[in-house]
Amino acid sequence: MNDTILNSYSGIKTHQFGLDSISNNIANVNTTGYKENIPEFKSLFATHLDSLNASSALSNDRNFGSTGASNAISTKNGNYHQSDGEFDMAYQGKGWFIVGPNKKGNFTIKEDGYEQDQANYFTRDGSFSRDSDGYLVNSEGYYVYGVNLDKIKNGVFTSSNNPDNDIEKLAKNDLTPINIPQELKFQPVLTSKVDISINLNPKNHFKNAQELFLDAKGNFIEDKFKHQDINALANNDEEPLDAAIYNNITLDITQNNQTQTFEFKYGNKGEANNEFRTIEDLQKIIKDKTGLDLDVARDKNKKPKIPLSLSIINNKNDMNISIGGKIAQKLGLNVANLAFKKGASQDSDPIKIPSYSTSTEIFDKDGKKFLLKSDYFMTDNGDSKTTPPINQKWEVKTGIYDFKAQVLVSKNPIIQTIQFDENGKIIAKPVDIDFKENKIHYSLSGSKDYQSTNLPYEESKLTQVTQDGKPEGSLKQVRVDENGIIYLAFSNGVTESMGRVGIAAFINDQGLRKVGGNLFEMASGTLNGENKLLSGNPILGWNTDGILKFGKVMYKYLETSNVDVGNALTNLILMQRGYSMNAKAFSTGDDLIKEAINLKK
C-alpha cells in the first residue's frame, strides 16, 4: 500500500473526529453552563530519511498521517442572563459548583488533598431547585454541596446571635448537601442584651416638671428638685432658659420707705459672689440675702400645684416687691412694685424640662413582644468653660412594660444618671433589668454602628437599636450574595445566613473529565511514572475570611454555553473541506495502485 492511502485515511479519521467535536458544540449551543471542546490534531508518526542526503542541512524528515491530539475544554466564561428560578445562580470566574449523589455525604477540601464519602462532580450549570425534602439539587437530581451552619433542625431555624462566629464557620472546608425546608419556622429568641444609640438634644422635646419631681404616688421629691440645674429648665412656651446668657434675677424690696436692690446671677462662683447654679443654691441665696423663700407653688394643703411652677413666698413682714431680670422674665415671675404681704406668694408660669422617651421592642422566650421604655430628663446642662468642666447630666428612668405600655412588667423601674463630657462623649454604665426571671443587659452608650450623642443641632432621636431578641417568623425569601452565602429572610424581619454554596477550583481544568449531564469529574492518570490527579487536588474557593478568591456568584442568573457560534460554523466548514480533500487524496492513491497493478497486464 502506498503512503498516500495511509495519510489520507488518517486525515479522514482525524477530521471526522474534529467534525464530531464541533457538531457536539453546536448541538449544545443552548445548554446552560456547557463548556465547548476544542479539537486539536498532531502528526501520527515521522521518520528520518538518511538515504536521501544524511549530511544535508535541510530537513529530510518524513511524516505519516495525522491523529487527534486532544479535545480540550474551553475554560472561558459564557454569557450571563437573568433567570426567575428561586435557586438559580451562576458562577463567574475560575471554579465550579460541587454536586454529589449522596444526601448524607461529605466532601472535605484540604490544603494537601481532599476526603469524600462518595463520588462528587463539578458543574457550571447553576439551574438548581429544591426537592421534596428541601435539598438543593441540579437537573440530574444530584445534591448541591456547600457549608451548612447547622441552624436548621426539624424544620426550625435557630439564630446563632453571633455574626462573628458565623463568618468563621462560613470559611470552613467541610461541605455537605444544602437543605432549606419549605415550611421553615424561625425559633423565637429571648432578649438578653439591648444596646441603643440616641441623640439627646437639650433644647427640644420638653415635658412638664412634675414628670421628674413627682414620684408614682404623686409625692414631691424634694432632693431631686433642689439639685436641678436652673439652666436645665424651660418656660411654659418650651423655650430653654439659657441662663448662661439670660443670667440674672433682681429683687427690689421696699420696707419702711427704704428700698434694697438685690441681683443674683447664674454662675459657679457661689453665694459670696451672689451666684447660683441649682435651685437649692437660689433658695439659699434668696433666703440669706432677702429673707424670702423660694419653693414650688403649693395649694392650701401644702401639696404642689399641677403643673409645677416656682413661687417666691413672703414669710416675713409686709413689703412691696419688684421682681425682674432676664430669668424672671422668661419664667413669667416678674412683677413691679407689688404689695407683698406676709404669707403672700408670687408664682411663675409652669416650668418644663428638656426630655425624651424611647421605646424598644423586646421578646420573651415565646416570641411575645414587650416594650423596654426609657424616659430622659436633663438635670444639669453642664458647663465646658469651668475648671474642671461640668458634664451635662440626664436622669434616665427605665422599665419593661406590656406591648401597650400600660402595665409595668419589670419589678421596679431602674433610675440611672448618664453624662456627656465637654467633648460630647457619653458616660453611661450598663444596667441589668429584671425580665421574667431573666435579666436584660441594657446599655445607652451606643449600638453596633453609632455612639450616643447630645448634638444640639439634631433632633432628639433613637438612632439605632442592637438587640439579640427576635420574635417567631416563617421563611419568606432566599437570597445568595456574591460570595455564595445563603441568607434566609423571615416574616419577622430577620435576615440571617444559613450556609453557603460550595465552590472548588483546580490548577488544571483540562484534567477534568466530562461524564454527561453537564458534569465533570476528577480523573487520575500516570504522569512520569506516577499516578496522580490530572486536574490537581481541588482548591477551596474562598479564603480564611470567607471571601471568594477566584470569582463571584451571581444570584438569579444563569451562565449560557460558551460556544462561539460564528467560530463553530467556520470551523465546521474547515473540517468539512479537510475531510473532502483527504477523501480526494485517498481516491487518488487508490487509482495509482490500480494503475500499477494493470502494468503487469
Image: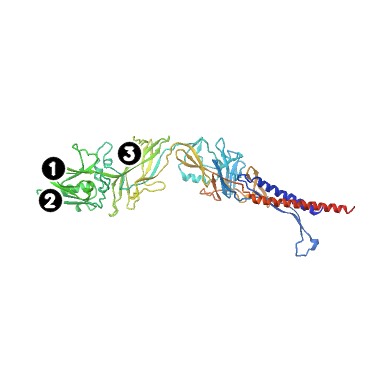
- Camera-nearest residue between 112 and 35: 35
Q: Position of residue 477 (x, y in %)?
A: 50, 40
- The secondary structure type at the circle numbered 3 is loop
Q: Position of residue 447 (x, y in %)?
A: 40, 46
What type is the residue that disc 1 sits on? Lys
- Camera-nearest residue between 525 and 42: 42
* Quarter of the view holding residue 518: top right
> Which mark sits nearer the N-terminus, 1 or 3?
1
Q: Is residue 384 left or right of residue 288?
A: right
Q: Which residue is mark 2?
A: 259
Q: Residue at x 49, y 37 (%)?
A: 475
Circle 2/circle 1 CB separation < 8 Å: no
Q: Which residue is mark 3?
A: 413
What type is the residue that disc 3 sits on? Pro
Crowd class of label 3 (few under 14; some 14 to 19; many from 20; radius 10 Å): some
**Mark 2 to mark 1: distance in Å?**
17 Å
Crowd class of label 2 (few under 14; some 14 to 19; many from 20; radius 10 Å): some
Q: Is residue 363 visible?
A: yes
Q: Which residue is mark 1?
A: 342
